[in-house]
């Protein structure tokens, strides 16, 4: 085996990191066909999101990442309606997504713990968090970075401009 390592002379323009969102208290009832739970985290700073990865095990049915902005509006960033444990993917956004400080990121997962789920190891038991595939997870990873002051000013300027246009159009 070989491994390549590239070292740049300059410092990178941005520091990108992975943020995890998880709910370790999940309890999926026996025989539940469409059980839903979520995890959420409020962003302390404005950020740019590049990609998202939902993760569950054999009972995972669907998954969603959404945001609730500080003004209360909501937006779905990623919807995986037919989650498959064997096809776990990172979903890269076509355009990086700016979110202001105070935005709540919500990761929701649905599970099928019924006998109709052919991948289900045992529909007769309540399933909780665990690392083994016969247990379950509500776990998400986001690749992101914090926004620069210039990016924040640019986006805040757009928001103020749009709000002014809405007020002008209601007269």
Image: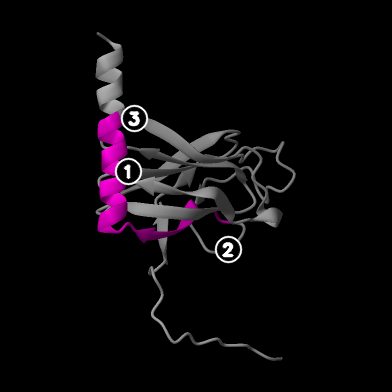
Q: Is residue 55 visible?
A: no
The mark closer to the camera, 3 or 2, is 3
Q: Position of residue 167 (x, y in %)?
A: 25, 18
Point 38% across, 47% down: residue: 98
The mark closer to the camera, 1 or 3, is 3
Along the line of sight, which residue is nearer the eye, 78 or 151? 151
Q: Is residue 160 left or right of residue 119?
A: left
Along the line of sight, which residue is nearer the eye, 157 or 21? 157
Give me the C-alpha separation between circle 1 and circle 3: 11 Å
Q: Element under label 3?
A: loop
Q: Quadrant of residue 117?
A: top right
Whichever of labels 1 and 3 marks the residue nearer the N terminus, that label is 3
Q: Which residue is mark 3?
A: 73
Q: Which residues are magenta?
A: 135-161
Whichever of labels 3 and 2 marks the residue nearer the N terminus, that label is 3
Against 30, residue 127 (above or below) is below
Along the line of sight, which residue is nearer the eye, 37 or 43? 43
Outermost residue toward the right in this view: 118
Q: Mark 2: give few (<14), some (14-19) or many (20+) Cα within 10 Å.
A: few
Q: Mark 3: give few (<14), some (14-19) or many (20+) Cα within 10 Å.
A: few
Q: Mark 1: give few (<14), some (14-19) or many (20+) Cα within 10 Å.
A: many
Q: Which mark is residue 16?
A: none
Along the line of sight, which residue is nearer the eye, 12 or 134? 12
């Amino acid at each position: 085996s070989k491994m390549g390592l590239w070292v740049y002379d300059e410092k990178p323009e941005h520091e990108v990191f992975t943020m995890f969102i998880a709910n370790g208290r999940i309890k999926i009832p026996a025989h539940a066909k469409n059980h839903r739970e979520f995890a959420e985290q409020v962003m302390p700073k404005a950020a740019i999101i590049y990609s998202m990865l939902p993760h569950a095990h054999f009972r995972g049915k669907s998954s969603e990442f959404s945001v609730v902005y500080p003004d209360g509006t909501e937006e779905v960033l990623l919807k995986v309606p037919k989650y498959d444990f064997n096809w776990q993917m990172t979903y890269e956004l076509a355009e990086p997504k700016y979110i202001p400080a105070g935005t709540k990121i919500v990761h929701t997962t649905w599970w099928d713990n019924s006998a109709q789920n052919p991948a289900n190891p045992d529909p007769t038991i309540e399933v909780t968090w665990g690392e083994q595939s016969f247990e379950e997870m509500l776990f998400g990873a986001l690749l992101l970075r914090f926004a620069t002051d210039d990016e924040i000013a640019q986006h805040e300027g757009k928001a103020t401009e749009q709000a002014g246009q809405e007020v002008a159009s209601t007269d």
